[in-house]
Amino acid sequence: MSFDRIIKAMTRNLGAKIVSLVFAFFLWLHVTAQQGENQSFRVPLSLAGVADSLTITHDVPEFIEVTIRGSRSNLMKLRLFGRLEASVDLSKAVRGRNTVSLSAAMINLPEQIDPRKVTVDNPKTLVLNFEDVVTKSVPVRIAYRGEIPDDVIIEGSPVIIPARVKITGASSVVGGIEVLSTREIDIRGRRGEYSEEIELMLSGMDIRIVPDKVLIEMYIHKRAIRTLANIPPTMLGDDENLLIEYSPRVASLTIEGPEEIIREITTEDVSIILDLTGRKPGTYLIEPEVIVPKGIMRYFLDTDNFEITILPAGSGSGEGQRDGDDG
């Protein structure tokens, strides 16, 4: 047979031959789609009906693995368009250990899938531990990022509103919480009034916090240090006729506090008091009392004690002073 005859034989009734091929192809698809096979699915797992008075104290699987047998077409539709979900009814759960068997009846299967051909592979059962839910009131504390800088002074105590919050959760977890911390705040470089609403932090614990934010208010100053020199002590006594000698004659006082307060203070604003009340003539080491204006955070005197010699009236000592004099 020549080549031309072969071409003519192949192209004779070409339309009918193409239709036959297409029909055969779709018939093959249909037959193949109806063949049964097994496919694996990951199905989201949800828990329903848990009483408000109970809570689970551990992680629960988010998915279960199942094997479904059905026609290839139905399984393909299920994979592409299905929204499978396994829901476990825990309305009858009690405090303590609860074991729940997982089955196809818990899965929202479409009508074309026979539940008898669905197998739950992993996990087959859930072991759930329930505890009582309790509520407790705990104080709030501020968490600072890093350490508070040395050049910063926080005036008084920061205000936290509210100062206490309520936490609700498993009794074993809530019972061990004594205080809640805020999200870390950074006050480096800040001056003046600071006010911010801050979230409360409790990482890794299934605890409900009410409210979950607090308002923090504080006033931040720049720290300053200054030394006031040549401050004479002031004598307090109940006998003006006594003559007094003392050493040292003057002292230096270093004060520390907010810059705007420190820079305005003079030696006239501070006092070094030596209390001689009830003391008779003799020599004493007396620890002074220092009085500083409001707002001073700390102060340091360059001497711990004054040596005081009390002389009887009429002793004639030229280096002393009368009680209450400036020296």
Image (cartoon, rainbow, N blue to C red):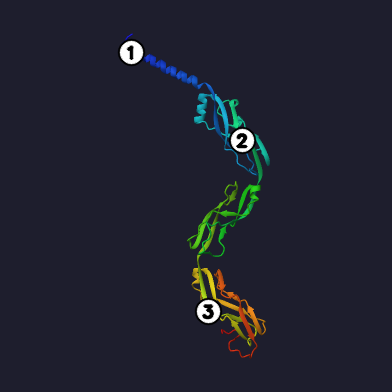
Tell me if residue 144 comes above or below residue 306 in the rendering: above
Q: Are marks 1 and 3 in contact (CB under 8 Å)?
A: no
Q: Neighbour class for label 1 at 10 Å: few (<14), some, many (≥20)?
A: few
User: Mark 2 highlights which residue?
Assistant: 88
Tell me if residue 146 comes above or below residue 85 in the rendering: below
| C-alpha gap between disc 3 and disc 2 | 83 Å
| C-alpha gap between disc 1 and disc 3 | 125 Å
| Snapshot quadrant of residue 138 | bottom right
Secondary element under disc 3, as helix, strand or loop, is strand
The location of residue 169, given as percent across then percent down, is 63, 47
The location of residue 156, given as percent across then percent down, is 56, 65
User: Mark 1 highlights which residue?
Assistant: 7
Mark 1 / mark 2, whichever is N-terminal: 1
Q: Label 3 is placed on what type of residue?
A: Asn
Mark 3 / mark 2, whichever is N-terminal: 2
Q: Quadrant of the C terminus?
A: bottom right
